[in-house]
Amino acid sequence: MPDLLPRFIEACQAANPVAATGGFPPFTAAFRSETPLNSGPYIYDMPAFEATFGTSPRRRRIIADCRAALDRLEAAGVRWQMLLVGGSFIREGDAPSDLDGLLLYAIDPSGPVADPARLSACMDAARTPLVDLKYCPADVHPIVLVKRVVFFSSLYGYDRATGALLHGTVMLVPGDLAGPRDNGRGD
């Protein structure tokens, strides 16, 4: 059973090249043929994320800041489970304004950041001008989890000019969930 999640992630990553070619739309196929495997959010591990989105010095700097923020959180005892990424980082060319993300996390309830004030300080310390993270604990009731993920997925995909949901999102997962992979782009 433990190998099912990496296999699911790998199957989902097969949609990444088509999604990238189309600018990461909410759906890559005809609406009636969408499945959890070929629709957004598009799943990447860090190496595939860097290979796909690190296409300019600005983008590589933003990714480095994101990686540093995740590392600071991990070092403080906040383990990230998933990072939902959207906004200009997914849509814009070589110079996106920043990386917008919803970070789902878990903490050790007996660890140093279990106290809400310490957790908040840890999250504040992870902020950078180029990475705008919002947070949601991964161990909350599914209603809270689904509500946060759907809200931010819709927010990140919303096109202000048209007032429509035009863009998809990318789900960055830790490498230990994804298992060994290629770069997720099919090359």
Image (cartoon, rainbow, N blue to C red):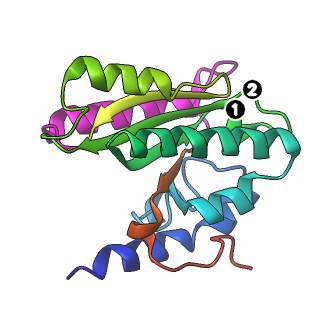
Q: Is residue 90 visible?
A: no
| Upstream in sequence: badge 1 or badge 2 | 1
Viewer-proximal residue, 22 or 44? 44
**In the image, 78: left or right of 33?**
left
Residue matched to label 1: 88
Amino acid marked by disc 2: Ser
Nearest the eye: 21 or 69: 69
Numbered disc 2: secondary structure = loop
Q: Which residues are magenta?
A: 139-166
Outermost front residue: 112
Q: Nearer the viewer, mark 1 or mark 2?
A: 2
Task: Judge the density around disc 2: few (<14), some (14-19), many (≥20) Cα neighbours within 10 Å.
Answer: some
The quadrant where residue 144 appears: top left
| Element on which disc 1 rests | helix
- Say the numbered circle drawn on residue 97: 2
The residue drawn where x is 50% and y is 66% is: 38
